[in-house]
Amino acid sequence: MNIQPKHTEPLILSGRDVTAVLGPTNTGKTHLAIERMVAHESGIIGLPLRLLAREVYARVCEKVGAHKVALITGEEKIQPAGARYSVCTVEAMPRETDAAFVAIDEVQLAGDLERGHIFTDRILHLRGRQETLLLGAATMHGILQRLLRGVSVVTRPRLSHLAYAGSKKLTRLPRRTAIVAFSADEVYAIAELIRRQQGGAAVVLGALSPRTRNAQVALFQSGDVDYLIATDAIGMGLNLDLDHVAFAQNRKFDGFQYRNLTAAELGQIAGRAGRHLRDGTFGVTGQVDPLDEDLVQKIEGHDFDPVKVLQWRTAQFDFASLDALKRSIETNAPVEGLTRALPAVDAQALEHLSRDEDIRALATNAKRVALLWEACALPDYRKIAPAQHADLIASIYTDLARHGHVDENYMAEQVRRADTTEGDIDTLSHRIAQIRTWTFVSNRPGWLADQAHWQEKTREIEDRLSDALHERLTKRFVDRRTSVLMRRLRENTMPEAEISPTGTVLVEGHHVGELQGFRFTADQTAGGEDAKAVRTAAQKALAAEFEARAERFGACANGDIALGSDGTLRWIGAPIGTLVAGEDALKPRLVLLADEQLTGPARDKVAARAERFVNFQIETLLKPLVDLKNADQISGIGRGIAFQLVENFGLINRRDIAEEMKSLDQEGRAALRRLGVRFGAYHVFVPALIKPAPAGLVTLLWALKNDGKDKPGFGDVVHALASGRTSVVIDPAFDKTFYKLAGYRNLGRRAVRIDILERLADLIRPATNWKPGLGQRPDGAYDGQSFMVTPPMMSILGATADDMEEILKGLGYRAEPKPAVEVKARLEAQDNAAREAVAAKLAAEEAAKAEQAKA
């Protein structure tokens, strides 16, 4: 130890054999330290973060073999027998060593209010036998030369250029960007926004366990996501593939107060952008105002205010008593350039515990006081109130003082409480903080009876919790589908697509949308660049599938295709086209429902097969209309009636063509009958069309021609026809044309099927043709000129007496009410006369037979 006390004079500190390698980020300082350490027979390197220690440990193992390297942190110890090199957190570095080489990284943290005194202690006291390296920012140049006489200072320039890029919106930040904020809530909010807009983000916070942080960093480094949302934890030596750093906040709580970041702190974080020889940029985003020109120049030029004092706390603790220990902690700094540090977590805990009578009763000798101070070193991973943290230390210390180790049952219960992976991100983060406390306890020599068991147990639980937290973070802030697709697109490689029988499209195992027929619909949960990436990847991957489907559709049977009542053509349930109006109602046009990717011969093949099916449907279901349209053998008036039938979809009121009917000869009538036309009393119509399938197609073709698909009643009347209804109550909201197209005629408040009206005519005709005295009176006959409504008439129409009056008026009949007595008397007289006439005729016939017999 190169410190020489001179009674009342200030300490004279030696920098002999010490080299300070100073410079901004990306100068290769850590790499140099690793190379120098493995060149010696033994060495120790101290790093500011457990995460960084893990990274350096892995790199040293690659160089010399894991059996030669130890990892020592507060929560983890890997110490192979005969290890020659030790990678430590600065807190875990020994205060004395006989190693040939010592390196301390990020020495500018000696000015940190919270941890600075630990860095200062190692800078001043720890030396390698042959070489000592102090690595850090150039701001340490002056203070190191002042405190360490004879220190050799080497400055290293940044390997790449760092430039200010101004302010950008969060959604406009470039790929490979780290967005920096200083609270978990802000980090999570930004990550959520980036997930929606860009597909996902990794998050790095100091509160995460090293394993979780490593997993999140790996997520970013692998290219699965292009954005990293982080606190200033990324500023400490994490080697990231960053092109840009954006500050979403520039104020933070430093453990004592909220304050703006210093230029050096901004530069430390901004310097993460651009690695090795690749230039980097930095800027601001969100609500942060653009940086002023002077500050930008300092960051770009790495010109920061020098560190003027280092935080210091004595290492010469007096364990004679609790009060003596407290007084020694409050010792003032011995030389200029050092300042006594504010009370750290351990000192705050000691202050609370020194007021506890039970603790004072136990800490009665130097050994017990030293043990209490050792217990106070327990880090406050949970970030709870000092009094609560002190209570935890008190429980541990009581066991250590009374029993020599922490009670196994107490330890088991605390560990059990943390041993579950259920819960959200905050819950898991809290549990990790809990288990890290007990991981630290398990790694303290002599604190547990079965130390190896608890080290393994707590490590296993922390790993599981860390993995669960990584999974929750990834699930919440990363759209795996989008990240995979975007990486594939960047690599210009063809994604692997899988299409299920139901049309679900999976690209790289992730659901990206649905393929229905020849149209791909991207998953609408994605937005922004995500939607574009999904569509681009799917289009590349589905090219061959479109070709194959076109071949299958072109060769499919009619049974695989269906034309819906709405005009949609479906192939095995999937829409592949829709009908629109053409110049001729019986020849609608087909519009394919297909992506532009279906082109050339494949598209022509699909269109031709679809058109053949539509023509087949029309020619089959509406064959009588097609035949009437093409009936060149009919001429004259018959040809004109055929034309009108086609124009009116097979139904004309006979009254409307009364003159033509008078002039139509028997040959014309016969020709039309052969084509399926029936000449009824009220209508000239085609009975074959008054069926659900033809009526539905007729309704559709009329709707296409007359913009009727959106009119009320479209398709509803055909449903009534399909149910077998001979008449229905007219819905006033429906377009009345739909009743006619389905084969109904509107009469009063009811619409009656045309063929049923003709059956009504068949019942009325005998009643009106009968004359009194011409035999038995038919049902409904009255006087040879009028007729009466009978139950059979109402039955076939499904109508009431009031309905019948309106229906018959609509058919041209006039109601003539008569008194019931008069009607009854007249009918009885007619029936009696008819019976008498029959009796007289029979008597005459018998008399004639008798005369013939006599003769």
Image (spheres, helix red, strand yellow):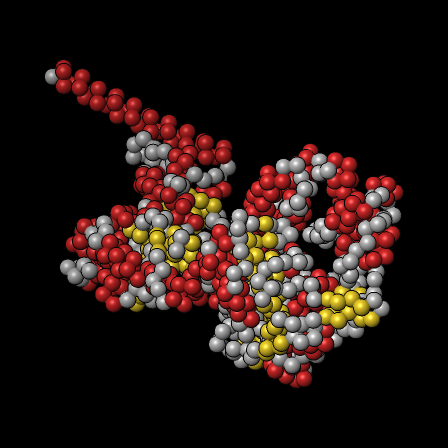
Quarter of the image with the C terminus is top left
- Residue 589 is left or right of residue 847, and the answer is right
Please name whichever residue, 31 or 253, is drawn nearer the observer in this view of the structure: 31
Quarter of the image with the N terminus is bottom right
Q: Position of residue 319 (x, y in %)?
A: 81, 51
- Residue 502 is left or right of residue 197, and the answer is left
- Residue 518 is left or right of residue 145, and the answer is left
User: Is residue 107 visible to the viewer in this orientation of the structure?
Assistant: yes
Report which quarter residue 281 is drawn in. Answer: bottom right
Residue drawn 48% across the image and 39% down it: 801
Residue drawn 45% across the image and 42% down it: 804
Please name whichever residue, 741 or 61, is drawn nearer the observer in this view of the structure: 61
Residue drawn 18% across the image and 56% down it: 668
Please name whichever residue, 253 or 179, is drawn nearer the observer in this view of the structure: 253
Spot the residue most to the top. Answer: 854
Q: Position of residue 568 (x, y in %)?
A: 36, 56
Q: How many marks?
A: 0
Report which quarter residue 841 is drawn in. Answer: top left
From this view, report whether residue 173 is shown above or below residue 386: below
Q: Position of residue 701 (x, y in %)?
A: 34, 58
User: Is residue 205 visible to the viewer in this orientation of the structure?
Assistant: no
Residue drawn 64% across the image and 43% down it: 442
Report which quarter residue 798 is drawn in. Answer: top left
Q: Position of residue 2 (x, y in %)?
A: 70, 66
Please name whichever residue, 455 or 160, is drawn nearer the observer in this view of the structure: 455
